Image (spheres, rainbow, N blue to C red):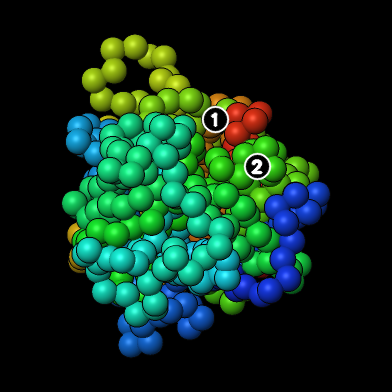
């Protein structure tokens, strides 16, 4: 058994700066490129709250996670507009990129649960308050409106034509936040850890002229990293070989995490295991197949209420870096929780804030059973930092919870793993790693 020590939660900001000399995408693609990820609640983050305790930050993260999961429900897709079924403010990451020529820096929510890239633009019919200047397409030599007959416009399904034939988009979120504007193409610039920024030409994005909802004033839009055709990852496509990966370091390491593209994103080596990516609708999400969970030597087969067959449904769980907790169906969760309780020689207590389900009162380290998540073809062995979190000096809680909505493999379960996505070979690869060094 492993020994429980202080677990750490992470919220990450993708930190990217700009300069005048840039790699082209092709030049960067020869060796891939890598950008830094900075913890959302780090002093380096613009969202850092110095007065907040670690417990408050954790609980806020759990609330965002639960709100996000409540809206990962395909039945909520809007019939009159494309809808990302999340709260936009629930994203775990922020991302700094630059748009236009000359480049204008923007701070945006980075989200693996949606696809569209967008920022607020002049002229603004209605915009939420942001502290940074609005992007003005008239000042960029590389900005181009897209026709309503273009393929990207067609991919939005509900887009309409303006009087000039430009593509007008509408995009809604689960809490009714929204962005409306013109679909366009523009040069996007991202810094790399090599020291030279990477220029990405003709990236399709939304120039939002009518935006509102629960967006933070320090942000100006959103970068979609999902699997749909309009996401940043999909648009980079063959130039990165369909590959990206990340390695998320615990906050206690006081180190940046990394997001990798192209050849820099290949995950291989000792301990690497791969599981198939399953194609399902909506294609925004990254679907895997969960076959079971082992607690110590006890293996529990995955079950979902109301299933008449003993066969495991393919694509029954999504992997999401923007959701903090891991969520599984209630009946299966009860079996997992029961096995965990049996393996820990302590008396469970309720979470005083009623966010988590299984907690223990102890100021001492205690033995945590090894927990293995069995995906098709890949057994991912979780460490204590992936399964329990210390909320108070004498309170630790299990970071899996029951959910009647879509099952989610959250980011706490992915800490200190190099996680690689390959849309060409249709697989996700996990490899244990010290993410302070990757």
Q: Position of residue 278 (x, y in %)?
A: 50, 26
Q: Is residue 386 left or right of residue 131?
A: right
Label 1 neighbour load within 10 Å: few <14, some 14-19, many 20+ = many
Could you say which is closer to the camera, residue 319 or residue 241? 241
Instruction: Name which residue lies at 30% across and 70% down.
Output: 216
Tag 2's secondary structure?
Answer: strand
Does the residue at mark 1 contact the one at mark 2 (Cβ under 8 Å)?
A: no
Q: Is residue 394 visible?
A: no
Which residue is the site of mark 1? 277
Question: Image quadrant for the C terminus?
Answer: bottom right
Q: Position of residue 430 (x, y in %)?
A: 63, 43
Q: Is residue 228 left or right of residue 218?
A: right
Could you say which is closer to the camera, residue 29 or residue 269? 29
408 relative to 201, above or below: above
118 relative to 431, above or below: below
**The label number, if any, that marks residue 243 in the structure image:** 2
Tag 1's secondary structure?
Answer: loop
Instruction: Name which residue lies at 56% across and 69% down.
Output: 103
Could you say which is closer to the camera, residue 288 or residue 151? 151
């Amino acid at each position: 058994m492993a020994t429980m020590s202080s677990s750490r939660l992470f919220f990450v900001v993708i930190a990217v700066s700009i300069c005048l000399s840039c790699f082209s995408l092709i030049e960067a693609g020869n060796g891939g490129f890598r950008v830094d990820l900075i913890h959302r609640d780090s002093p380096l983050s613009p969202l850092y709250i110095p007065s907040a305790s670690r417990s408050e930050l954790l609980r806020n993260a759990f609330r965002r996670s639960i709100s996000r999961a409540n809206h990962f429900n395909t039945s909520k897709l809007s019939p009159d507009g494309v809808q990302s079924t999340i709260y936009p403010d629930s994203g775990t990451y922020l991302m700094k990129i630059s748009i236009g020529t000359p480049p204008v820096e923007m701070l945006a929510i980075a989200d693996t649960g949606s696809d569209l890239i967008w920022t607020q633009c002049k002229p603004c019919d209605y915009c939420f308050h942001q502290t940074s200047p609005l992007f003005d397409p008239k000042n960029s030599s590389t900005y181009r409106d897209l026709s309503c007959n273009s393929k990207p416009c067609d991919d939005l399904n509900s887009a309409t034509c303006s009087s000039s034939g430009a593509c007008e988009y509408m995009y809604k979120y689960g809490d009714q936040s929204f962005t409306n504007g013109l679909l366009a193409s523009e040069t996007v610039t991202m810094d790399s850890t090599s020291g030279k920024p990477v220029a990405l030409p003709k990236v399709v994005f939304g120039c939002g002229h009518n935006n509102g909802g629960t967006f933070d004033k320090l942000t100006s839009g959103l970068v979609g990293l999902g699997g749909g055709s309009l996401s940043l990852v999909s648009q980079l496509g063959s130039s990165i070989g369909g590959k990206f990966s990340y390695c998320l370091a615990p906050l206690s390491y006081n180190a940046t995490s990394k997001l990798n593209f192209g050849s820099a994103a290949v995950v291989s080596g000792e301990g690497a295991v791969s599981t198939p990516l399953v194609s399902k609708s909506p294609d925004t999400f990254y679907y895997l197949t969960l076959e079971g969970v082992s607690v110590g030597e006890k293996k529990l087969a995955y079950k979902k209420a109301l299933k008449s067959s003993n066969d495991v449904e393919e694509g029954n769980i999504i992997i999401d870096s923007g959701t903090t907790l891991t969520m599984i169906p209630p009946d299966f969760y009860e079996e997992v929780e029961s096995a965990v309780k049996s393996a820990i020689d302590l008396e469970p207590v309720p979470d005083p804030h009623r966010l988590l389900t299984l907690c223990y009162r102890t100021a001492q380290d205690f033995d945590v059973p090894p927990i293995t998540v069995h995906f098709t073809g890949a057994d991912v062995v979780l460490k204590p930092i992936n399964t329990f979190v210390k909320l108070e000096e004498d309170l630790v809680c299990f970071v899996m919870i029951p959910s009647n909505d879509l099952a989610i493999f959250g980011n706490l379960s992915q800490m200190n793993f190099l996680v690689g996505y390959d849309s060409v070979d249709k697989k996700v690869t996990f490899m244990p790693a010290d993410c302070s060094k990757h």
